Image: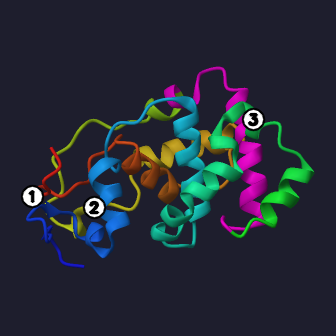
Amino acid sequence: MSASSDTAVDGLIRCPWSEASQLYRDYHDQEWGRPLHGADAMFERVSLEAFQSGLSWITILRKRPAFRNAFAGFEIAEVAEFGEDDVARLLADPGIVRNRSKIVATIANARVALDLDTGLDELIWSFAPPRRPRPRQVADVPAITAESVALAKELKRRGFRFVGPTTAYALMQATGMVDDHLADCWIP
């Protein structure tokens, strides 16, 4: 990975990580870093970031359609109703990451999200940092920030699992709470 953005075959300058595959390019161009709202949409991102822990993001992107199918479109109210039969079904599903701890955490996180006094979207966005200039090179992109530490701490306090500061920062990047597209990236 180079220190700055790369020019792709289509002539557009993108963040270097996005040039590894067409799936990454599409994710970079259409989703990553764009503001996302909605409780179920946020729940999906929290869940996928948790499943990504210890794995590459491309693994999760490739499996995302299967995850959506297996987890009822990440509709919080539906996932909150999952029981042991669903855990067994998910553990047998080769289309997703079959990690019992992460599956059980996703179901538990849905139950917590369902019982929030504020919506999940509002809770997560309340930790959005002030806008800052885009990073000039990959080395300028942090792995955690004070805001991601605070978000992870608050989510854990409320009962969420698999939401450490690094996962929280990746969530902030994915949902547009921070803009870590490099300064010369074509994304406006």
Instruction: Inspect this view and state whether residue 163 appears.
Output: no
Q: CA distance from mark 1 to mark 2?
A: 14 Å
**Nearer to the camera, 62 or 127:** 62
Q: Is residue 150 above or below residue 123?
A: below
Q: Secondary structure at mark 3?
A: helix
Q: Earlier in the sequence, mark 1 or mark 3?
A: 3
Residue 22 position within the rendered picture, expressed as x and y whole percent measured from the top left: 32, 67
Give whichever of 38, 50 is nearer the camera: 38
Q: Residue at x 89, y 46 (%)?
A: 83
Q: CA distance from mark 2 to mark 3?
A: 36 Å
- Residue pictured at 61% horizontal, 61% vertical: 51
Taking 158 as reference, is 1 left or right? left
Left or right of residue 102, residue 140 in this image: left
- Magenta stretch? 95-122
Q: Which residue position holds label 2?
A: 141
Tell me: residue 151, above or below residue 162: above
Q: Nearer the viewer, residue 52 or 91?
A: 91
Q: Secondary structure at mark 2?
A: loop
Question: What residue lies at 64% left-to-right and 42% top-to-bottom?
Answer: 74
Mark closest to the chain's N terminus, 1 or 2: 2
Give the distance between the C-alpha atoms of the residues marked 1 and 3, in whole angstroms. 42 Å
Q: Residue at (40%, 43%) from the top-left corner?
A: 175
